[in-house]
């Protein structure tokens, strides 16, 4: 069952990245350096152990952003030591400022969307696990 849950959360994480990074200019922030967009990524934690981490692909000259995103994901592992967790991050320290002051959506709408999808994805994972178990029994 763990494998299916980890895969479901990874897939949801990938979809979150696409939703955040690939918005139209009207729905997003102005991407001067590429650091904020490059700092967007996710990790799936399996009781504190990082199961998978996104690539933090560099956009424009956003190498610093990719590094900050990876750093944030690594720092969060201990926070999720007692649960399965999908954590989506914007690793640049000004991401909150962009949402709060500039009223631009960085993570907020995607977090809401992911919350509506997580049960669906976990139920599919459960069904896959049950099917695997039933095949073993035969």
Image (spheres, helix red, strand yellow):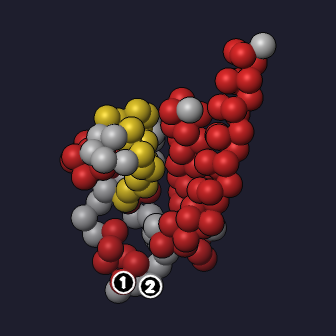
- On screen, residue 127 versus residue 81, left or right, reads right
Residues marked 1 and 2 touching at CB (< 8 Å): yes
- Mark 1 Cα shell of 10 Å, populated few (<14), some (14-19), many (≥20): few
Q: Give the percent coordinates (x, y) of residue 57.
A: 45, 41
Element class at badge 1: helix
User: Residue at point 38% right, 56% down?
Assistant: 89
Asked if 26 appears above or below 11 in the picture, the reply is below
Quarter occupied by residue 110: bottom right
For residue 103, the mark is: 2
How far apart are the alpha carbons under marks 1 and 2?
5 Å
Which of the two residues, 127 or 92, is positioned nearer the viewer here?
Answer: 127
Asked if 25 appears above or below 84 in the picture, the reply is below
Q: Give the percent coordinates (x, y) of residue 67.
A: 28, 43
**Residue under pointer 1:** 100
Q: In this rendering, does residue 65 appear at all?
A: no
Which of the two residues, 121 or 137, is positioned nearer the viewer here?
Answer: 137
């Amino acid at each position: 069952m763990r494998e299916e849950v980890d895969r479901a959360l990874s897939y949801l994480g990938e979809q979150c990245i696409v939703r955040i990074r690939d918005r139209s200019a009207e729905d997003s922030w102005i991407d001067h350096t590429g650091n904020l967009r490059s700092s967007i990524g996710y990790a799936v934690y399996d009781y504190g152990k990082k199961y998978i981490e996104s690539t933090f692909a560099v956009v424009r000259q956003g190498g610093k952003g990719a590094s900050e995103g990876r750093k944030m994901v690594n720092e969060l592992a201990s926070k999720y030591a007692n649960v399965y967790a999908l954590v989506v991050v914007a690793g640049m320290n000004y991401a909150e400022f962009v949402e709060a002051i500039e009223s631009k959506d960085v993570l907020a709408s995607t977090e809401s969307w992911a919350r509506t999808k997580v049960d669906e994805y976990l139920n599919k994972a459960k069904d896959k696990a049950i099917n695997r178990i039933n095949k073993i029994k035969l």
